[in-house]
Image (spheres, rainbow, N blue to C red):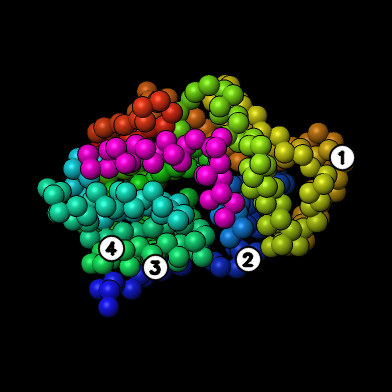
Amino acid sequence: MSGALEPRVRVLLDPDWASGSLVDDVRRGLGGRPRRLPPKWLYDDVGAGLFDEITRLPEYYPTEAERAILTAHAAEVAEACDAATLVELGSGTSDKTRTLLDAFRSPGRSHGPLRRFVPVDVSDATLRGAATMLAERYPGMAVEAVVGDFTLHLGHLPRGDRRLVAFLGSTIGNFYLEERRAFLGALADSLDTGEWLLLGTDLVKDVDRMVAAYDDDAGLTERFIRNCLTVVNRELGADFDQGAFSYAPLWDARMERIDMRLRAEEPSVVRVPGADLVVELATGEELCIEISTKFRLEGIATELADAGFEVAETWTDPAGDFALTLARRT
Ligand code: AVJ
């Protein structure tokens, strides 16, 4: 027998998306201008699988860059911070997290081993798979998974036990500026003084490399972005025609972000019965599906300070493509 503790899975997200916030998001996002859809709806089981494939694309450097930082510095992270619970927001397959868990569970760590891991993700199936795997791999560590939305459920995270919240993969780059500020503020509010944040951020670099990472030759990113139309068609009975849209990723130099859009190539009337909405699109009109903001080290420190965090340490990969920042709630 493996001494594994059964993982606990708490579901805070309504499994029936159509009755939940998808309707609100579609009404607000597709009804307003610019027309937007929040990127969390990209991650149904198909989308989560596509994203997993994207991370293995030759053009998509962030995953490997962050993994390299974790491999080189996880022990320093574990030593620099006295956490006994690790919370991971948007944990996905928790693949990279294993490096972190190994470091936090190392017998040599001065603060004692990590007792609890709380992966938080919107993708129920992905989360359950990861939770089972981790519970088996780390006997003696409690796995308390949360199927939830980290923009809504920060207040429901288990408290106490000196938490470290890991927000990796530059997922924070998906937020618009004002959303990012609100998110960091809410995260700071949910933490006690002295608790920790480990933030992964993709850094500004050569434009061609950044664009290629979101416009890969295999077309996986395009399929990933287009999947949101499939999700809205399925969940809300919409009649988006994929053929009427083209994928148009661009680098927004002013905001320093990749902007992934779908552009209407012909005038179309899209019915979304589940949201009680009809959207009329002229040729050239765009749907903003996802942004991926790129950061600078000074900017990260300033934004964290504004939210109530103090940077303890920052690590980058040798090429300086990606950063991992450990910060403390002040
Ligand atoms: C998961 C948000 C980090 O912005 O690079 C990858 C998502 N979208 N390719 C990113 C994504 C298209 C990814 N994050």
Q: Which residue is mark 4?
A: 138
Is 159 in the magenta? no
Dot 4 or dot 2: first in sequence order is: 2
Dot 1 or dot 4: first in sequence order is: 4
- Which quarter of the rendered picture does the N terminus lie within? bottom left
Query: Mark 1 or mark 4, which is nearer to you?
Result: 4
Q: Which residue is mark 1?
A: 266
| Left or right side of 301 for 254 | right
Q: Residues within 10 Å of mark 1 (few under 14, many from 20)?
A: some
Q: Which residue is mark 2?
A: 19
Is 69 in the magenta? yes
Which residue is drawn at the image coordinates 64% and 48% (left, top)? 224
C-alpha span from label 2 to label 3: 28 Å
Which residue is drawn at the image coordinates 63% and 42% (left, top)? 221
Q: Is residue 27 visible?
A: no
Query: Please, what secondary structure does the residue beneath circle 3 have?
Result: helix
Looking at the rendered structure, the kind of residue marked 3 is Thr
Based on the displayed image, in which of its 4 quarters is residue 67 positioned?
A: top left
Segment colored magenta: 49-76
Residue 38 picture location, percent across and down: 60, 47
Query: Mark 3 or mark 1, which is nearer to you?
Result: 3
Looking at the rendered structure, the kind of residue marked 2 is Ser
Residue farthest toward the right in the current orientation of the protein = 267
